[in-house]
Amino acid sequence: MAINSVTSGLSPLAGLTPSTGTSSATPAGGALGSFGDMVKDLVSQSVTASQNSEQLATAVAQGQPIPLNEVIQAVSKAELTLQTLITVRDRAVEAYQQIQQMPI
């Protein structure tokens, strides 16, 4: 198994970086999407990854023959996506607070 195939599914921002010239965060005009669109996409990816990891963990608990490494990868991807989302939120709040403290 190639290393690229294992790590390619672990990036929480995979849909946000233009690897093929198009991405989910780039409108048809080629301009970058808004910050809100990026956050919405990241939240959606986080929810999807979390649901996927829950489904795999439940299937394994029910005795279905799913390789344990797939479950571990899905849980790791969900955790990484959530950590990325929390970091973006914290940075946005920090930036807002810095703007509020600027003298007029």
Image (tube, rainbow, N blue to C red):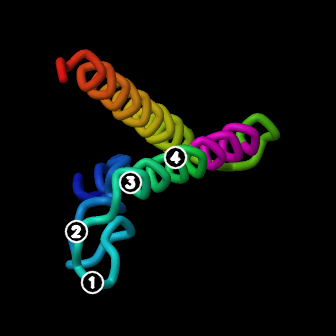
Of circles 3 and 1, the one toward us is 1
Residue type for callout 3: Met
| Quarter of image, res 83 | top left
- Specify start and end residues of the magenta stretch as a single range: 50-59
Of circles 4 and 1, the one toward us is 1
Of circles 2 and 3, the one toward us is 3
Q: Quadrant of the C terminus?
A: top left
- Dot 1 corresponds to which residue? 29
- Tell me the CA gap for discs 3 and 4: 9 Å
The numbered mark at residue 18 is 2
- Dot 3 corresponds to which residue? 38
Of circles 3 and 4, the one toward us is 3
Q: Nearer the viewer, residue 3 or 97?
A: 97
- Tell me the CA gap for discs 3 and 1: 16 Å
Residue type for callout 1: Gly
- The outermost residue toward the front is 104
Q: Secondary structure at mark 1?
A: loop
- The outermost residue toward the bottom is 28
Q: Nearer the viewer, residue 58 or 34?
A: 34
Q: Secondary structure at mark 2?
A: loop
Q: Is residue 65 magenta?
A: no
If you read the primary sequence from the N terminus, does the residue marked by circle 3 or circle 1 appear first?
A: 1
What residue do we see at 23% from left, 79% from top?
A: 30
- Dot 4 corresponds to which residue? 43
Q: Are marks 4 and 1 in contact (CB under 8 Å)?
A: no
If you read the primary sequence from the N terminus, does the residue marked by circle 4 or circle 2 appear first?
A: 2
Q: Secondary structure at mark 3?
A: helix
Q: Nearer the viewer, residue 38 or 45?
A: 38
| Quarter of image, res 29 | bottom left
If you read the primary sequence from the N terminus, does the residue marked by circle 3 or circle 4 appear first?
A: 3
- Tell me the CA gap for discs 1 and 2: 14 Å
Q: Are marks 3 and 4 in contact (CB under 8 Å)?
A: no
